[in-house]
């Protein structure tokens, strides 16, 4: 009998073999930089450089991604190329760009970077793209030799780093590094004060509210030459450290930057899981891309709402639950499969989404009437599309600035992600 119990215990462990961090990794970061170039039809990856960075901010237990989110995926295998030792889903600005009209008539390149714990031994990196049917394919493979003297080792002592919140060990914390954009040397004290205000906003929202001790906030004090950010539509151009700008893809409020290299160089001053760029402007705008970066304006009446909305994108890969620019779903989605984002559905396979959270008797699709407000259903209009893409509740932090809460579906996902980073 004793033997049987032992066997029962051992079998599941073998099936889901945990990667022992110390067998494969050193507690610092390997950053792999590349350019992704192409257009709406095709794209390629070109190697740029490998860097060694001083900290590892991620989990040492949850190394293999269990979420299957993101348009892209980094897969790191041992030297035989068969054992997966680290993986992470992510999205990028290039992936958004290929849905624009510009990508139909021209090709462009975007700098991208992925991070992973620093391998002790040779390892095989594979970059994968998700196709329209949600299947991942390897588009680039590279053998990483951790002994190579071409791995770039920079010094990280030029700018002061400070921890503004949290006491948890980085491997058990969600570490958020906040970078200042468009703050001059004289404005750096304002940056520090602004971040403190945003930390206050952050912990007003569930589930962060109940998990204050699981989150660390870091700042890196880097000045910009000029104050503010670029506003191309108004002819305003500023010399700033991270080269952010409004009017991304000609959407006035879409605040982003293509300067991923500088962002990663500065983020590396602290252990981090998420990068937040705070932009010293009062003009309404922001941006958030899954495991890529977050941006938010510093001084606007909606700063509080936008800050956590963008974090929903970058941290938990949540889709926007509003309509914007597209009438028909097939302009953006393959309607034969579910969109990969957890909080939108085309009802092709609703069971794989939040159907189990819908009360009995709830009509699906759910009519947009008073009686169904605040209840989980499937409301038409989400993911930038008016028709045939549905969202879980009438309103959610991922839909509007009118509510302070994530809907139950978004909240569940954010909670699971928080667990993944902190357990
Ligand atoms: Zn939601």
Image (spheres, rainbow, N blue to C red):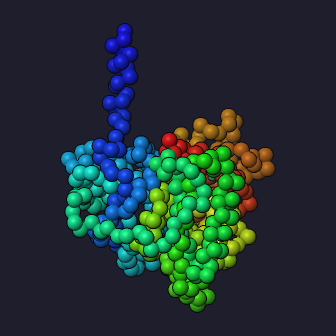
Query: As displayed, is residue 400 above or below residue 373?
Result: below
Q: Is residue 106 visible?
A: yes
Task: Give me the residue at 66% from left, 52% from top.
Answer: 406
Residue 57 in which image quadrant: bottom left
Is residue 329 at all visible to an observer of this figure?
no
Q: Residue at x 71, y 68 (%)?
A: 302
Q: Is residue 273 left or right of residue 32?
A: right
Look at 29% across and 56% down and name the residue there: 126
* Image spot of residue 163 (x, y percent): 56, 60
Q: Residue furthest bottom?
A: 235
Q: Position of residue 174 (x, y in %)?
A: 53, 52
* Front position in the image: 381 or 118: 118
Q: What is the total number of numbered labels drawn onto the structure image? A: 0
Residue 203 image position (x, y, % from top left): 67, 54
Query: Can you say which quadrant of the picture contains the N terminus?
Result: top left
Question: Of residues 80 and 356, which is closer to you in this image?
Answer: 80
Please state the horizontal and vertical placement of residue 358, each as a whole percent of the image.
65, 39
Residue 325 in the figure: left or right of residue 300: left
Name the quadrant containing residue 102.
bottom left
State the image quarter where residue 217 is shown.
bottom right
**In the current view of this chain or complex, which residue is farthest to the right?**
370
Query: Residue 392 or 288: which is nearer the viewer?
Result: 288
Where 117 falls versus 177 (above or below)?
above
At 35% from the left edge and 70% from the top edge, which residue is drawn? 154
């Amino acid at each position: 009998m004793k033997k049987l119990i032992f066997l029962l215990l051992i079998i599941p462990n073998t099936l889901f073999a945990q990667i022992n961090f110390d067998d494969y990794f050193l507690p610092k970061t390997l950053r792999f930089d590349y350019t992704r170039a192409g257009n709406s039809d095709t794209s390629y990856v070109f190697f740029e450089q490998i860097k060694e960075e001083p900290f590892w901010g991620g989990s040492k237990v949850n190394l293999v991604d269990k979420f299957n989110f993101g348009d892209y995926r980094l897969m790191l295998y041992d030297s035989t190329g068969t054992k997966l030792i680290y993986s992470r889903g992510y999205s990028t600005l290039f992936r958004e760009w290929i849905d624009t009209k510009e990508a139909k008539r021209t090709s462009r390149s975007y700098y991208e970077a992925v991070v992973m714990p620093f391998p002790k031994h040779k390892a095989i990196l594979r970059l994968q793209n998700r196709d329209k049917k949600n299947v991942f394919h390897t588009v680039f493979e590279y053998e990483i030799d951790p002994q190579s003297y071409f791995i770039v080792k920079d010094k990280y002592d030029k700018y002061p780093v400070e921890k503004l919140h949290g006491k948890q060990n980085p491997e058990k914390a969600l570490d958020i590094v906040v970078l200042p954009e468009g703050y001059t040397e004289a404005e750096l004290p304002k940056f520090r004060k602004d971040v403190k205000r945003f930390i206050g906003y952050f912990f007003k929202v569930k589930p962060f509210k109940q998990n204050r001790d699981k989150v660390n906030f870091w700042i890196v004090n880097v000045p910009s030459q000029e104050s503010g950010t670029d506003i191309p539509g108004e002819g305003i151009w500023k010399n700033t450290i991270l080269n952010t700008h409004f009017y991304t893809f000609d959407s006035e409020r879409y605040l982003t930057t293509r300067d991923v290299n500088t962002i990663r160089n500065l983020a590396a001053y602290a252990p981090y899981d998420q990068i937040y760029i705070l932009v010293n402007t009062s003009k309404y705008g922001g941006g958030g891309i899954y495991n890529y970066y977050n941006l938010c304006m510093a001084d606007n009446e909606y700063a509080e709402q936008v800050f956590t909305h963008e974090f929903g994108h970058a941290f938990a890969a949540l889709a926007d639950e509003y309509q914007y620019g597209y009438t028909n779903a097939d302009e953006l989605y393959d309607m034969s499969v579910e969109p990969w984002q957890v909080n939108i559905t085309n009802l092709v396979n609703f069971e794989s989404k939040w159907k189990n959270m819908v009360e009995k008797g709830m009509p699906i699709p759910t009519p947009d009437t008073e009686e169904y407000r605040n209840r989980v259903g499937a409301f038409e209009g989400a993911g930038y599309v008016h028709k045939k893409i549905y969202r879980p509740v009438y309103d959610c932090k991922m839909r509007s600035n009118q509510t302070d809460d994530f809907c139950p579906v978004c909240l569940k996902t954010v909670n699971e992600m928080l667990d993944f980073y902190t357990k």
